[in-house]
Image (cartoon, rainbow, N blue to C red):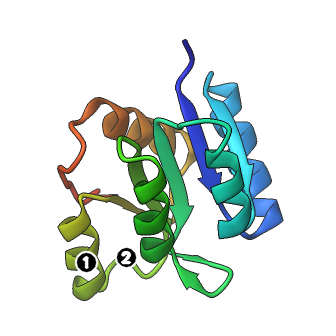
Amino acid sequence: MKTTILLLVSDPVVRSVLHETLELAGYTVIAAGDLGHAVDRLKEVKPDLLITRTYVEGLPGHDAAMYLRTKCLKMKVLIVGGLLDDDRLKFRESAQGFEVFPKPYPPSELLQKVKDVLSSPRGTFSQSSV
């Protein structure tokens, strides 16, 4: 069975590129542009991983991830994007067991990070050195 990823990214261009990159790597990708659409998708499927950006339509990605995880408790979380060099944000993410991955990153490094997150036990935290 394929690994399923819920991709919550409000920017349509970024969402499209990430969607294509993940699908070409063999993942089943369910894309959502906002929190409401993501919640609707969770009624249909329970993904293995949520990938979201630091902010999604004015909502911190952390808050969106916390809410979505209440709907799918076993789902792992990877937050990608900027502003991840702030120590307060790193602490906030680590407290929830979310993985963080700052940009810029090439597709190969993103795919490796996805593999790492999927193979790690939920609740562990490792800050990417990229």
Q: Is residue 1 above or below residue 30?
A: above
Which mark is on residue 128? none
Residue beneath label 2, please?
Answer: 84
Give the residue type that dot 1 points to. Answer: Arg
Quarter of the picture containing the N terminus is top right
In the displayed structure image, the side of residue 96 where residue 106 appears, left or right: right
Which residue is rendered at x = 48% and y = 76% of the image?
A: 82
Q: Is residue 101 above or below residue 4?
A: below
| Residue lying at 68% horizontally and 38% vertically, measured from the top left | 44
Residue drawn at point x = 75 percent, y = 64 percent = 33
SS class, disc 1: helix
Q: Position of residue 118 (x, y in %)?
A: 36, 34
Q: Residue furthest top?
A: 1
Horizontal relation, residue 36 to residue 55: left or right: right
As drawn, is 82 to the left or to the right of 96? right
> Residue 2 in the image: x percent, y percent?
57, 18
Compare marks 2 and 1 and give the one earlier in the sequence.
2
**Quarter of the picture holding the C terminus:** bottom left
Q: Name the residue that disc number 1 marks.
A: 92
Dots 2 and 1: beta carbons under 8 Å? no
Q: Residues within 10 Å of mark 1 (few under 14, many from 20)?
A: few
> Nearer the viewer's eye, disc 2 or disc 1?
1
Q: Is residue 31 left or right of residue 26?
A: right
Instruction: In this rendered view, identify the residue nearer to me: 36 or 58.
Output: 36
Q: Residue at x 61, y 47 (%)?
A: 42
Q: Is residue 102 visible?
A: no
Provide residue 70's location: percent of width, then percent of height: 41, 58
Near mark 2 (Cα within 10 A), the count class, few <14, some 14-19 or many ≥20, is some
